[in-house]
Structure formats: C-alpha cells, structure tokens
Amino acid sequence: MDAGDFLAVAQGGADEDAAIVHLRYTHPKAKQTVGLIGKGICFDTGEHNLKPARYMQGMHEDMNGSAVALGILLAASQGKLAVNIDCWLAIAQNHISPKAYKQNDIVTALNDTTIEIVRTDAEGRTVLADTLTLAARAKPDLMIDFTTLTGSMAVALGALQRHTR
C-alpha cells in the first residue's frame, strides 16, 4: 500500500506484530459514517531515541487509542446503534533493532508526503499519518482520532512538578 510512515515504525519489530487493521460496523438505518482512528503502539522503547528505563514503565499503554476506538466499535455493535463505523487501528511496536528506522531517514507517507525522521520516539504521529490517510479516503462524515502523544502532552501542558516540604 506504500504506507511508508507506518512501515518505518513497524520495521523495528516482527512483521506479525504490526498492521493497520480496518474493522467496520454497519447498521441498515444509519445515515452517517464515523471514522474512528486509534494509535496502537503496544510497546514503545523509543527506537534509536531510546527512552531511559524509568520512562519505559507503562509504555505498553501506548496502545490506549486503539483500545478506545475498538471499545466504541464493540459498544456500538452490541447496542445496535444506528450509525456506520469505520474503525482504523494502527498496531505496531516501536522497538530498537538492526532494522529500526533512525534519525535522518526520509520516509514517504501514503499521501506521497516525504518526512525526515528527526525523533524516532515521535512514532505516534508517524503511524497515524498513514492511518488517517486511509480513514479519510473512506470519506466518513466525521473522523475521531484517539491517541496518546505523551511527549507532546508534556510540551503542551508542562512537566509534572512534585513539591515536597
């Protein structure tokens, strides 16, 4: 499919550990289609921008975006909601290995945008670029992206500061 952004992150892990999964729920009375997109990094080492060990604790939770999208799909189907849902899950692991992508690599996204990799621990944006492109091509009426961009949260909201007396 030429999803070069997604493949750049995924190539550090085993082939069977990565996929852009597309699940669909349809209802015969639905008037709208909602696209749910979830980041599913099942473990994040940071690849060549390796995280310190203390920051790897909890990185199995970097897949929460896909878990939320899948949970909504499941709830809608069990509740027989009158909405169509296209659910896109960007499932991969951000591992360090001889095949892992590295800083200064140039990758080509599914929409033909070329991107220079500056930080391999910014894998969320990378896997989501191609997954969002696929979701947009399905032309849903609404798209909702679920992700954990932990590094960006610290920049946007500031680092947690602990005060002791």
Image: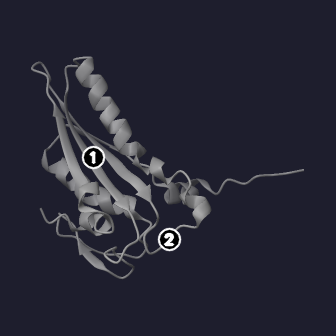
Tell me the amino acid under the disc marked 1. Leu
Residue drawn at (24%, 61%) of the image: 15
As drawn, 23 above or below 18: above
Task: Judge by depth and name the residue closer to the eye, 159 or 8.
Answer: 8
Q: Is 162 placed left or right of 77 in the picture?
A: right
Q: Circle 1 sits on which residue?
A: 89
Q: Residue at x 64, y 57 (%)?
A: 159
Q: How many marks?
A: 2
In the rendered image, residue 47, in percent from the top left (x then y), is placed at 43, 70
Residue at position x 53%, y 50% from top?
Answer: 58
- Quadrant in which the N terminus is drawn: bottom left
Q: Earlier in the sequence, mark 1 or mark 2?
A: 2
Q: In which quarter of the image is residue 4?
A: bottom left
Label 1: which secondary element: strand
Q: Where is residue 65 in the image (x, y as percent from the top left)?
A: 38, 44
In this picture the colour scheme is one colour
Name the outermost residue toward the left: 28
Which amino acid, mark 2?
Leu
How busy is the neighbourhood of tag 1: few (under 14 within 10 Å), some, or many (20 plus)? many
> Residue 156 is drawn in which quadrant?
bottom right
Residue 18 appears in view: no
Q: Quadrant of residue 86?
A: top left
Does residue 46 appear in this view? yes
Residue 142: x and y, percent? 24, 38
- Residue assigned mark 2: 50
